[in-house]
Image (spheres, grey):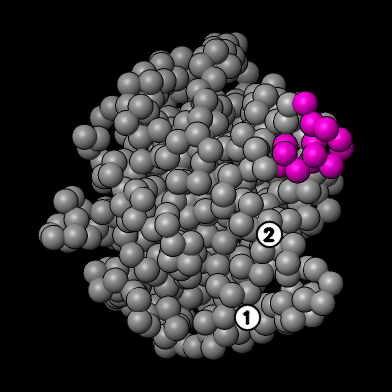
Amino acid sequence: MSVLDLTAAEITAKIKSKEISAAEVAKAFLDKTKRENPKVLAFLKIHEDDFLKSAIAVDAKIQNQQPVGRLAGVPIAIKDNMHVEGWETTCASKILTGFKATYDATVTQKLKAQDALLLGKTNLDEFAMGSSTENSSFFTTRNPYDTSRVPGGSSGGSAAAVAARFTPVSLGSDTGGSIRQPASFCGVVGLKPTYGRVSRFGLVAFASSLDQIGPFTRDALDMANMMQTISGLDPMDSTSSDQPVPDYAASLNKGVKGMTLGVPKEYFAKGLDATVKEKVMAAVKVYEDAGAKVTDISLPHMDYAIEVYYILAPSEASANLARFDGVRYGHRTKNPANLLELYEKSRAEGFGTEVKRRIMLGTYALSSGYYDAYYLKAQKVRTLICQDFENAFKKVDAIITPTAPSTAFKVGEKSSDPLEMYLSDIYTISCNLAGIPGISVPCGFSNVGATHASPLPIGFQILGRPFDEERLLQMTAFYQSQTSWHKENPVLS
């Protein structure tokens, strides 16, 4: 088996046993990435020197019989809205041109402490605003299963990097589905943790009450090890939780017998692709056959999730992005006549179309005379959505839904219709509004036919109680023990 097909856990085990060196692992992944990234465009920048130096440092620890971390020698890609000290952070936006981080995000600091090898920064929709990675100011990332199609968004680069075997794991961020939707489109596992489970310190904010960092992997054990590394209370993030972090890997083999799983009718209504529904229900059957009880449930306010999200998220974005003004860092317009013109032109030149659209939406929703009609009302409906989940989890242990209503769409197919693009996150947004954990797991492929030149990945979503990531990983591990969808490997054309 090629080192490129090994999981992160297998790589670390082989490095610790001296069966292979971290330098050999790094070279294999670097060669693969340099050779095939031009077809996928997952990375905005590869930091080759830092990557190779980290590998040499891990080998030196092994040689000197020093202890190494749980991610020793594992190549990892980082979404370019998280800081790595000394590396440029662009958020795929021209307005941050030339900005270099002066400190590590808490998550990257924790990865380094566990001897991970950071390969580079991945592409995203500008400031994480989008569902296809077409909103990047630089280029569109491609889906490794079909390069004429999108990888999803906004964490499309991180999902594509894992699917294409450029790295075995990566980090993304999820504000309304930006980890889970690309995970579904690219045939990998993607987890959005509970709000507060993972520190957001060093993550460039989009919508502060919704953003959460999470990993992409190919299997449940790697996800458990990544979550073990990045979870926990952080004094640098006032919203991080002091909830104890369990031993995630310890629960992976417990099975699902005796669990009660809910299937919400609202997620299987009009607009869901027939093949997606078929594959998701087949996944439900795997759990049912293993002794889990499956019951129909209702989340009655789910129909309002899109409207609520596209009031609250842009409102928070308009406030968070006010700091990008051309004064302190990043893009500054040339020869402004006065301070007002400096602000106006710097922001007009630096921000892309979708970011401007959301800033205007949010500013309008927060403006005098409209606050009660839009923002306040949306917060009240958000509370109702939270209550729907609270009521559901009194009856069931977890909820199973499709991750996305369709497979990956063609590049350019939805870019001219913002509403159509927004609807691609219809099944993931409510999870962020409620602050609960959600994971997307590969469960099959589309049929080859008139609409698809090649099979495209499909994922199903598991939603859990707050801070119950352990159960989501347990369910993922069981499903993967019964199926092999997560082992599929795209052939880049």
Q: CA distance from mark 2 to mark 1?
A: 25 Å
- Read off the residue under disc 2: 360
Any mark on residue 385, and which? 1
Q: Residues within 10 Å of mark 2 (few under 14, many from 20)?
A: some
Q: How many marks?
A: 2
Q: What are the residue bounds of the magenta stretch?
A: 335-347
User: Considering the image in quadrants, where does the N terminus appear?
Assistant: top left
User: In terms of depth relative to the viewer, which is nearer, 408 or 187?
Assistant: 408
Question: Quick check: 153 above or below 476?
Answer: above
Q: Residue furthest left?
A: 449
Foreground residue, 226 or 86?
Answer: 86
Q: Is residue 173 left or right of residue 243?
A: left
* Residue 203 % position (x, y): 69, 43
Of the residues under marks 2 and 1, which one precedes in the sequence?
A: 2
Which residue occupies the extreme right position in the image?
Answer: 339
Classify residue 139 as left or right of residue 464: left
Residue 418 at what x, y percent from top left?
48, 62
